[in-house]
Image (spheres, rainbow, N blue to C red):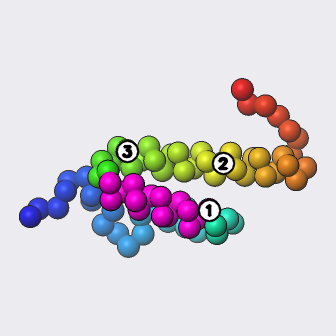
């Protein structure tokens, strides 16, 4: 059986090098990996894979902003 055409981006040993290296939240990294792997197993569409990566990146960005605002490192602001 031929491999699925949309799986080519997952052939390397690491699908997420930027997310893996230099990420301060080890607990988030574990959650992101688990959820992304479950997503890949269920949906093998490369477009949705990129979309899901974008969602992960935005979640981390929002988490970091909220943490910085709560600790007083940055000013509190509303983005709506």
Residue 75 % position (x, y): 88, 41
Q: Which mark is residue 7?
A: none
In this rendered view, identify the residue nearer to me: 41 or 15.
41
Q: Residue furthest bottom?
A: 13
Does the segment drawn in magenta span residue 18?
A: no
**Residue at 81%, 51% in the rendered image:** 68
The kind of secondary structure element at disc 1 is helix
Does the segment drawn in magenta span residue 33?
A: yes
Is residue 22 visible in the rendered image? The answer is: no
Q: Which residue is mark 1?
A: 28
| Magenta stretch, overall SS | helix
Please tell me whether residue 48 is drawn above or below residue 79 in the rendered image: below
Is residue 80 toward the left or the right of residue 35 in the image?
Answer: right
Estimate the spatial distance between the alpha carbons at disc 1 and disc 3, rounded to whole Å.
21 Å
Residue 25 % position (x, y): 67, 65
Is residue 71 visible in the rendered image? The answer is: yes
Q: Which residue is mark 2?
A: 61
């Amino acid at each position: 059986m031929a491999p699925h055409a949309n799986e080519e981006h997952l052939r390397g040993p690491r699908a997420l090098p930027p997310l893996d290296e230099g990420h301060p939240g080890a607990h988030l990294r574990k959650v992101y990996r688990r959820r992304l792997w479950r997503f890949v197993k269920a949906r093998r569409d490369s477009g949705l894979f990129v979309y899901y990566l974008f969602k992960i990146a935005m979640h981390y960005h929002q988490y970091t902003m909220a943490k910085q605002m709560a600790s007083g490192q940055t000013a509190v602001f509303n983005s709506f």
